Amino acid sequence: MDSRRNKIIKIISQEQEEDDELFFLLVPALYASLYEEKHPVHTSSLSGAAKVKEILEGHESWSRVEFRMEPEIFKSIVDYLRRENLLKGMSRVAVEEQLAMFMYMISHNASNQDLQKYFQHSAETIHRKINRIFDLIPTLAQIFIKIPSSLQPHPKIVLNNRCWPYFQNCIGAIDGTHIPITIAEDKATPFRNRKGTLSHNVMVACDFDLNFTFISCGWEGSASDAGVLRSAISKGFHVPEGKFYLVDGGYANTPSFLAPYRGVRYHLSEFRRRRSSNTGYADHRELFNHTHAILRNHIERSIGVLKKRFPILKVGNHYPIESQIKIPAACAVFHDIIRAQSGDEAWLDHQPPLIPPETYVDVPEGDDVNQHHHNEANNGYTLRDQIAMQMWADYNN
């Protein structure tokens, strides 16, 4: 009995000795961690709020580069968001800084870590503020991306003898544009486009003031432009009675979506070469296609300005897929607001790239010729022929 008791006492003593050794090892380490010199993460002499204030009160080129718009337009957007109670300022992050975070992100393809460094806030704060504006995008798109209430013929048509009265019922142009996307490999296949890269196909419509009047994001890169349009129609995209949009050869020709004649000279560069050789139009189809191309060029110009202002649309990013899909709509919203306030665009042609061009993703520029027929195609052919023959008769007279 005594030997067993002594054995237990010995075991307990050994455990106590081991605990004492562990104690003397851990205490100095804990003591050192409590009193070691801390290295703060946010060490900039300017807080995010101070930096935004400095940019908005400095030369307008600063705001153009960092936020892609003039400072007075930026302030106007802030006033609107605050007045409509769409965005609330917090004690540490005012509305100005929240908008600045988002604009800097879509202008520079900035990551959360980039934004932490620039604005001197924690990752969690950046995440919440960026997501708050992402949540606003559908609401802002409904407000700012819409068909004008007045459907009177546009002055660019009325005042142009080449277009009037033939295109008096035309309210704009439609096209698809591919935007790079980053997605998990197991979900990537539908987003792989014919160039072999990953993108989503975004359908946009614009008017003749280069404002976007409709946008549909998120379609897989493998989807055709015509398929995206058909889906948009099934979900409520509506063309007013008697009006039509101009589309390219990737779409079916209908009374609501007028396409050029196939197999006939169409691109503006082809007509420039013909004009330089002093040869006229071969027939009514060439005449129609040339005028169609001049007007439809507005959608190409709108998309060009959009991607030049917001180069994030040319590269992949690592935001969640739900946010990536909203980015083109966000850029279109701010594009329309900037244009409505007469924001300048000429300066975009003289700026060094904010994002290295070597990181741009190669995506398709347009669909191949649409091979699908449409129930309304015959009516579309009739309308197109009527316009083209009237143009041809007047041209020859």
Image: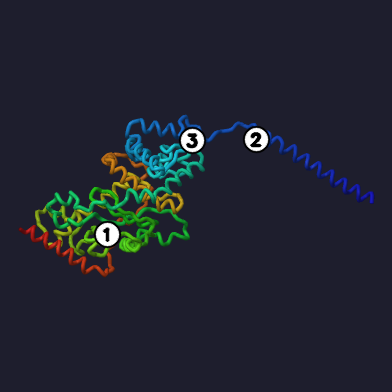
Nearer to the camera, 361 or 298:
298
Query: Which residue does the numbered mark 1 point to in the structure image?
Result: 239
**Quadrant of the rendering where the C terminus is positioned:** bottom left
> Residue 20: x percent and y percent?
78, 39
Q: Amino acid at mark 2?
A: Ser
| Residue at mark 2 | 33
Figure check: 25 above or below 369: above
Q: Earlier in the sequence, mark 2 or mark 3?
A: 2
In the image, is residue 351 above or below residue 236?
A: above
Residue 123, placed above or below residue 164: above
Q: CA distance from mark 2 to mark 3?
A: 32 Å
Q: Secondary structure at mark 1?
A: loop
Residue 282: x %, y % from top left: 11, 61
Residue at (46%, 60%) from the top-left corner? 187
Distance in Å between CA atoms under marks 1 and 3:
46 Å
Q: Please state if 139 lies on the left or on the right of 24 as rendered.
A: left
Where residue 261 sits, quadrant-wise, is bottom left
Can residue 283 be seen here? The reply is no
Kind of residue indicated by mark 1: Val
Q: Which mark is residue 91?
A: 3
Q: Residues within 10 Å of mark 3 (few under 14, many from 20)?
A: few
Secondary structure of the residue carrying tag 2 is: helix
x and y percent of residue 301 in the render?
Answer: 26, 49
Lateral position of residue 81 relative to residue 156, left or right: right
